[in-house]
Image: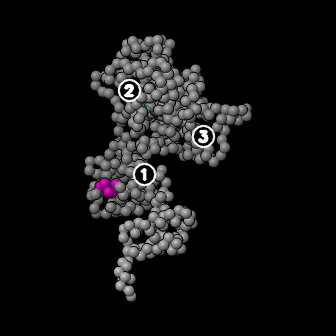
Amino acid sequence: MAPEDTGISPRRRLPSVDEALKAPEASAALAKHGRTALVDALRASIAEFRAKGEGASAADAANAASALLDKADRPRLRAVYNLTGTVLHTNLGRALLAEAAIDAAANAMRSAVALEYDLATGKRGERDDIVRELLCKLTGAEDATVVNNNAAAVLLSLNAIGAGKETIVSRGELIEIGGAFRMPDIMARAGTTLVEIGTTNRTHAKDYAGAIGERTALLMKVHTSNYRIQGFVKEVSPREVAEIAHARGLPMLNDLGSGTLIDLDGYGLAHEPTVAEAVAEGADLVTFSGDKLLGGPQTGFIVGKKALIEKINRNPMKRALRVDKMRLAALEATLRLYLNPEKLAERLPTMRLIARPVAEIEAVAARIAGPIGNVLGPRFAVTPIVCESQVGSGAMPLSVLKSAGLAIKGRPLDALAAALRELPVPVIGRLDDGALVLDCRCLEDEPAFLSNFAKLALP
Ligand SMILES: *Cc1c(COP(=O)(O)O)cnc(C)c1O
């Protein structure tokens, strides 16, 4: 044997792409991902072995390339377990839809649908017709329209009614919703001039009346859905603001934010103004979200006076902000559930999860504590705890829901949280006071959860 040959270390031995492609280990990946993608992945894998100074067989390269392709093939928008304790978690997609809504959306995806087609006359219809009647019935409003989300509903309303003129709002209601939704910025984009009145903590009826001038287009109330100002405060009720507006022949817009369709007092929650109440109090327009407390797909609603809704619908922005057939289908099915309020908590996941009895959640935590502890082993202590959930999405910021879950302590906790996010169905908890807390309020399918959890690769 020549001296140079013995000098070739095993790290230099790497297969060619062709050799690896012929390895039996490559055949499944070839069938699943195709030759082009597999060749690219083999090149990348072999280059990685080379860079690390490691040797590899054709089988090693094929296995590495298959793993690479499988990982790249995982959807970015993956299902996760939301054990954060926040039921309507904006970053986790807010409301889970009802089965009826899921079926309706799937059906609309597969089929042609009468989206803008009147089946009675065979003539062109309007997509708002699909939900207008339901929305009017559920809110008591004369007319209704649907757009992309509540931010769009506010933007469109302000532009259609207030562009080139002034909109009067209390300083105590100039909200920021997160992201870039700040009321003064939305007003600027809508082309209406914001006229701020009152102070942060106190606004009086005379502040509204005194600010009305020739250029005033509307008076606006904004539900401070994600915060409360407490202490020495004075706010003018929506009814009074509407009266002040009407006395001067002006409309009043009430942005409710969450906008529940039913009285939540019955679900053990603080009273949140319902849309029907806002309409009955005299608001000419009410805006609210579809995927907050309502429990439907991402949508925004404007309900109110017919003449104003017609004006809004004539605004070119309406076309830019409209919703597609899938969401309209899911929305219609969701709204229909409200026609039978007695069954709502059973059929609408948002209500079911918000109203879930704490004893039931405690029982979930108690049942899964053992199996979870076994997977985590002796380095981590798993303790059933009582904790507090929240509704989320800025709804009812001061209401906490008594809940239960598991507190996991041990080291390294950050690495454990990261490993939970690497599971086939990632598990998202929250770090709280030196523990990783898994709030069990939104955990319903325990067997699936446990078999997923068993695949944990511990740090
Ligand atoms: C949430 C909220 C919005 C924005 O609604 P999206 O549906 O998230 O666009 C606007 N105004 C208020 C008061 C809100 O609470």
Badge 3 or badge 2: first in the primary sequence: 2
The location of residue 89, given as percent across then percent down, is: 41, 43
Horizontal side of residue 73 vs 310, given as left or right? left
Horizontal side of residue 419 vs 75, given as left or right? left
Give amino acid for label 1. Tyr
Q: Main SS type for the magenta part? A: helix
Callout 1: helix, strand or loop?
A: strand
In the picture of the structure, the residue carrying the numbered disc 2 is 174
Task: Looking at the picture, tell me which residue is in the foreground, 173 or 193.
Answer: 193
The location of residue 363, given as percent across then percent down, is: 38, 52
> How far apart, in angstroms, are the residues tagged by discs 1 and 2?
34 Å
Image quarter where ligand 1 lies: top left
In the picture of the structure, the residue carrying the numbered disc 1 is 81
> How far apart, in angstroms, are the residues tagged by discs 3 and 1?
28 Å
In the picture of the structure, the residue carrying the numbered disc 3 is 325
Give amino acid for label 2. Leu
Q: Report the residue that reaches farthest toward the bottom.
A: 1
At 35% across and 85% down in the image, what residue appears?
Answer: 3
Image position of 196 with respect to 226: above or below: above
Few, some or many C-alpha atoms within 10 Å of disc 3 (few <14, some 14-19, many ≥20)? many
Please say whether residue 414 is one of the residues in the magenta stretch: yes
Q: Quadrant of the C terminus?
A: bottom left
Horizontal side of residue 53 vs 19, given as left or right? left
Few, some or many C-alpha atoms within 10 Å of disc 1 (few <14, some 14-19, many ≥20)? some
Numbered range of the magenta stretch:
413-417
The location of residue 159, given as percent across then percent down, is: 50, 25
Choose mark 3 or mark 1, whichever is in front. Answer: 3
At 34% across and 18% down in the image, what residue appears?
Answer: 198
Count how many numbered circles sit on residues in the image: 3
